[in-house]
Image (spheres, coloured by chain):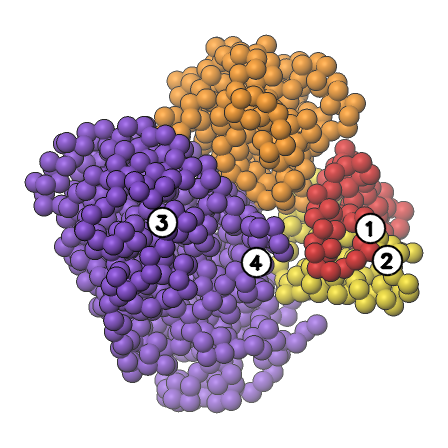
Chain colours: A orange, B purple, C red, D yellow
Amino acid sequence: MQSAIIVFPGSNREQDVFDALQRASGKKPLKVWHRESQLPKADLIVIPGGFAYGDYLRCGAMAANSPIMREVKARAAAGTPVLGICNGFQIITEAGLLPGALLANKTLKFHCKSVHLRIETSQTIFTSRYQAGQVIAVPVAHHDGNYFADDATLDRLEGEGRVAFRYCAPDGSLDDASNANGSARAIAGIFNETKTVLGLMPHPEDATHPLQGSLDGVPFFAGLVEALA
Amino acid sequence: MTERPSSSERPAGPALAAEFGLSAEEYARAVAIMGRAPNITELGIFSVMWSEHCSYKSSKNWLKKLPTTGPHVICGPGENAGVIDIGDGMAAIFKMESHNHPSFIEPYQGAATGVGGILRDVFTMGARPIANLNALRFGSPDHPKTRHLVAGVVAGIGGYGNCVGVPTVGGECNFHPSYNGNILVNAMTVGIAKQDRIFYSAASGPGNPVIYVGAKTGRDGIHGATMASAEFSEDAEAKRPTVQVGDPFTEKLLIEACLELMEGDTIVAIQDMGAAGLTSASVEMAGKGGLGITLDLDRVPMREPGMSAYEVMLSESQERMLMVLKPGSEDKARAVFEKWELDFARIGTITDTGRIILTMQGAVAADMPIEPLVTQAPLYDRTYTATPARAELRAAEVEAREPIAALKTLIACPDLASKRWIWEQYDHLVMGRTVQRPGGDAAVVALPDSAKALALVSDCTPRYCAADPERGGAQAVAETWRNITAVGATPLAITDNMNFGNPERPEIMGQFAGCIAGMRAACLALDYPVVSGNVSLYNETNGTGILPTPVIGGVGILADAAKSVGLALKHPGDTLILIGETKGHLGCSLYLRELLGREDGAPPPVDLAAERRNGDFVRAEIVAGRIAACHDVSDGGLLVALAEMAMAGGIGASLAAPAGIPIHGFLFGEDQARYVLATSAPEKVLANAAAAGVPALVLGLSGGDQLTLAGCGAISVGELTQLNEAWLPMYMAGQTPDGRR
Amino acid sequence: MKARVFVMPKDGVLDPQGKAIAHALGNLGFSGIGEVRQGKVIELELHATSEGEARAALDQMCQKLLANTVIESYRVEIVG
Amino acid sequence: MKARVFVMPKDGVLDPQGKAIAHALGNLGFSGIGEVRQGKVIELELHATSEGEARAALDQMCQKLLANTVIESYRVEIVG
Ligand SMILES: Nc1ncnc2c1ncn2[C@@H]1O[C@H](COP(=O)(O)OP(=O)(O)O)[C@@H](O)[C@H]1O
Ligand SMILES: [Mg+2]
C-alpha cells in the first residue's frame, strides 16, 4: 500500500502517522507539501493532525481552501480512500468531504489523554480488523473535537451506518463523562456515503508501538494495509 | 490610548538613563566609553545590554562557581543553550528560561511567549525540539489573582506548545503566598541534533551578509529586558509596554525553515532575537566574533509605520532570528524562507571595525564600540549575609496525628494534589515517542531511530531553600538526579533557572550564594554539570521577596527505552522495599505545614555520598529488569509516595508498622536519598543492596484495593484517588471541595 | 474601504463560549443576564470602487472562508 | 435590554489571526486586501432600567471579564 500524507504549514502529527503506516505496510508513505501542484498516485490519502495555519479563524478552514484540497476531493470522488485524523478531520469536514462541523470542546479546554472508543461497524476498510462493539483505548489531543450536525444529518449518519467510533466507558456504555468533548451522540469519527472517507478526532497512530502504552491502533492500520494492498 | 512616552523626542541624558534603569555610575561609564553623551538609541542599547537580564551583573561572579564541564559536555554555558553528547553522534541541547514578570501582567501571552522564547534558544543551535517542561509557582490559592493566573498560564503554555507540535511532558506546580505578587513561569526545552550539525552564535567573515528572518518587528515589549530586571511595584500596570503576543504558527514555520536551512551549508552563525531583540542578537554575534556589524534599519521588516531606530533596536517582537550567511548563499536561504512564507531580509553586513553602526533614513542612528559594551558591562560583588541556620527539629517534638487522616489531608493539599488538570491541557503525546507521561518522576521520551530515550525533569523545593539555602540548593539538584534515576535513566547534566528577590538586599544575595554553594556540591558529587541556565532577580512586590527558587532541569539517558519503569504498581504480590535511610526528619516537611500550620525547623540534610550510592544501586536494579515500579520519596514522605504508587496503578498495598522511630517521622519525614521499589525478586534485590551497603527495608506487599497500615487502619485506593484528583479541578471551577464557593 | 464582518453561531448550534460567559458573569455577581452568544468580528480594509462591489466581494469571502455556514451566520457592514 | 460588546486587539498589538486571514484571503484570489484584525463580539440580554444603567454594567463586565484590557480594547453598543 502506498500512502500519501498531505503536509500543511502547521501540521504536526504527520510523522506519527508516517511511522504507524510504515510499521504496518513496510513502505514509506510519501509526504506531500500542500503547495505541490501534483498529488502523486496513492492508495490512501492522509490528512494528519496538527494546527494547519495555526487553526486561526476556525480549525481547518484555511487548509480546506488550499489548492491541494481540490485534488484531494477529486481523488476521493473517484474512490481513493481518504483518512483525516484530528486536524485532518476538521479540514476534510470544512472542505465538505464529510457533513457537520467540529466545535470547541464543551470544557473549552484542550485535552490530551487516553479515551475509550467503541467500534460501531467492522464493515469498512478502516475497521475490518475490529469487531463491532469492541472497545479500544487510544489517545485524543484536541481543543475543538465537539462534533456537531443537525438532527436530520445525525439520523442519516446513524441510519446509513456511517458512525465509525463513539466515545464510551471502558465497558462500552455511553455516558456524559466519557464523552469529554461533548460530541453529538458521542461521535468520535464518521464516514462518507461510500465509507471510503473517514474523519476521526482520536489518534490511532499514537497507539501502534509498545512504548506508546497501547497497541489498539495496530488493527486500524493493519486492516487498511490488507484492504488496499 | 497611546500613553507610550514618545521617547524618540526626549533628550537623552542622565534623567532618561535613570528611567531606562541605568545607575548614575553606569551612565557615566557609558559616556566614557562613547567619549560623548550617547543619543537615545545608543542609550537604549546600553540600558538593555547592561540590564540584569542580559548582563548578569549581580550573579555572574557566583555563577562562575558552578561546575560546567564533564566528559559528555559539548558546550556549557555561554551559548543559547547547553549541549551534551548522548552517543551515536547525537547531542541533546537544552535550556530553561523564566518569563515571570510578563506572565504576571498577561498570563496567557506571557507564558506562551516564554515557551516560544526557549524553543528558539534550542532550535537556533540546530536542534529539533522534542520536549518541553514547565516549572510554575503561584501565590496562595486564596489570593484573589491566583485562579486567573493559573488558568491563563496553563492555557498559554498549552496554546503555544500544542500548536508548534512539541510535547509538553513534565514540570511542576506549587503554591505559596510568597508568590502572590510575583509568580514564576520557567519553561524548558530539550532538543536533539547531530553533533556535526550544531550552530553557534559567533559571527565570522567581514563582508558576510546579516539576515533577518521570521516575523515582522512591531513595538512589542520595548524595555521588557529592563522590566525583567526591576522590582514590581503596584504601578507596574501603568508603566507596562505593549505586551508581546505569541504567534505559535509562525514559530512552527520558523522551526521548520531553520532546520531545513541547517541541513545545507549556508549558515555561519545564528542567534534568536530574545530579550532585547535585535540589540542583543547583533551585539552578541559580532562581539563573540570580535568583529563589527552595520545594520540598515530601513530594511528591517516592520509591522507598523513610523518606528524609530530606538524602537526597532529594542523591540521584543517574537518569532524572529538573525543569521550570518556564507557569501553567495543568500538565494538558497531566501528560497527556504519563502517556501515557509516567512520574512527574509538582508539588513546588514559583518565588518572588521569592532563597531556597531546603525543607519536609518540616511542618517547614522548609532555608532558604538562593541567590545567595551560587552566587557565593560557592570559587574557587582553585592554584599550578602548568610541565612541564619535553623534548629533541627526532632520528630519527638512534633505532634503525631492519626496517619490515615494525615495522609488524606496531605494527598489533597494544593502542592500534592494531582496536576492532571494542568497536563491534560498540554499535548504530551505528539511526536509519538512519550514513554513515561506526566504524573511520574521523570518523563521519558524515546529518540527517533534509536533504542535510546531521554529522561527529563524539573524540580526545586523552595521552602527548603528559604530555610537553608545550601541544603536547598543541593536538594534541588539531588532530587532531579533521583527522579531521573527512578525511571532507570543515567543523569547527565542540568540547566537551571535561578529565581530570587532583589539582589541589592544582602539577605537575598545570601540566599543566592547559599543555593549556588549547595548546587555546586551536588553537581560535583553526582557528576552532573550545569550546561545552561538563566537568572531572574527582582522577583519582589513592594519589598516582599519570593522564596528562593533555583529550579533545576535535569536530563538523563536510557540505553533502552523499553527498560524504563514508572511509579504505578503493576501487579499484586510484589514486595515493596524502601531504599535509603529513614531518620524521620520532619523539619520543613509538608506534614508540618499542612497539618500543624508550621514552617519551622531545618530542611532534611542531603548526604550526597548516600544519594549517589543509593541511586546507582536503584538504577542498576531497574536496568537488570528486577523492578516493576519505582518512586522516589520526596514531598510528603513515605506514606505519600506509597499512596502515589497505589493510585497510579490502581492497586493497593499492605504495610507493616516500623520499629524504632516515631511513626509520624517514619511515614511523613522527608529524609533524602530514598526510593520505594516494587519487585517480584525481593531476595535478589535485598542481597544486592546489602552487598552495596545500601539500606533496604521491606515495607510490605502490593495487592488489594486498599492501602493498609498495620495497626493504623486502611483507606481505599479509590478514595485516595478521588481526594487527590478533586482539588485542582474544583479549585479552578471556583469551588472548594466541600462545594462552597 | 473599511468593512466589518460579524460571524455568529446559528440558532440551535451549541455555543459553549456564550454559555460559559453567562455563567461567569453570574458568578461575578451580575444578575439579570439572559442569553449570551459569542461570535467573531473581522475588520478589514479592502479595495472596491462601490459599496455594491465591496458587498459582493465580502459575501464571497464569507462563503469561502470567513464563515462556516453549517454552524454560523454572517452579516457584513461597510464602515466607510 | 439587548447589547453587543466588541472586543478588538489594541492598536499595535500583534494579531496573528488577522494576519493569517489576510494571507488566506490573498491565496483565495481576493486582491486589494489591506489590514485585517479579528476580534470578538458578544451579544447579550441584560436587565436594566435605563441605557445608562446598562452601559455602566456592561463597562464593568468588560473590565472584569469580557475584555483583556492589557491587549484588547472594547466598545459597547445597546441594540434595544
Ligand atoms: N544560572 C545559570 N547557570 C548556568 N548558566 C547560566 C545561568 N544563567 C545563564 N546562564 C547562561 O548564560 C547565557 C546567557 O543566558 P541568557 O541571557 O538567558 O541567554 P539567551 O539570551 O540566549 O536567552 C546562556 O548560555 C545561559 O545558559
Ligand atoms: Mg538566545
**Residue type indicated by callout 2:** His
Instruction: State if disc 2 and disc 1 touch (CB < 8 Å).
Output: yes
At a point 38% along the width and 39% down the height, the residue shown is B714
Instruction: Please provide percent x and percent y for residue B697.
Output: 19, 42
Q: Chain of mark 2?
A: D
Q: Tell me, yes or no, if residue B399 can be seen here.
A: yes
Q: Which mark is residue C34?
A: 1
Left or right: where does residue B377 sit relative to residue A16?
left
Chain at numbered mark 1: C
Residue highlighted by disc 3: B403
Determine the secondary structure under disc 1.
Answer: strand
Which amino acid type is shown beneath numbered disc 4?
A: Arg
Q: CA distance from mark 1 to mark 3?
A: 50 Å
Q: CA distance from mark 3 to mark 2?
A: 54 Å
Which residue is the site of mark 2?
D47
User: Mark 3 vs ligand 1: CB under 8 Å?
Assistant: no
SS type, badge 3: helix
Mark sitting on residue B147: 4
**Local crowd at mark 4 within 10 Å, few (<14), some, or many (≥20)?**
some
Vertical relation: B343 (above or below) B145: above
Tell me if the residue at label 2 has its CB under 8 Å from ligand 1.
Answer: no
* Three-letter residue code for mark 1: Gly
Q: Do discs 3 and 2 share a chain?
A: no
- Tell me which chain the residue with mark 3 is part of: B
The residue sitting at 27% across, 33% down in the picture is B701
Contact flag, marks 4 and 2 (Cβ < 8 Å):
no
Q: Are marks 4 and 1 in contact (CB under 8 Å)?
A: no
Q: Which of labels 3 and 4 is toward the front?
A: 3
Tell me if residue B376 comes above or below residue A139 in the rendering: below
Cα–Cα gap, marks 4 and 1 = 26 Å
Of badges 3 and 2, nearer the viewer stands 3
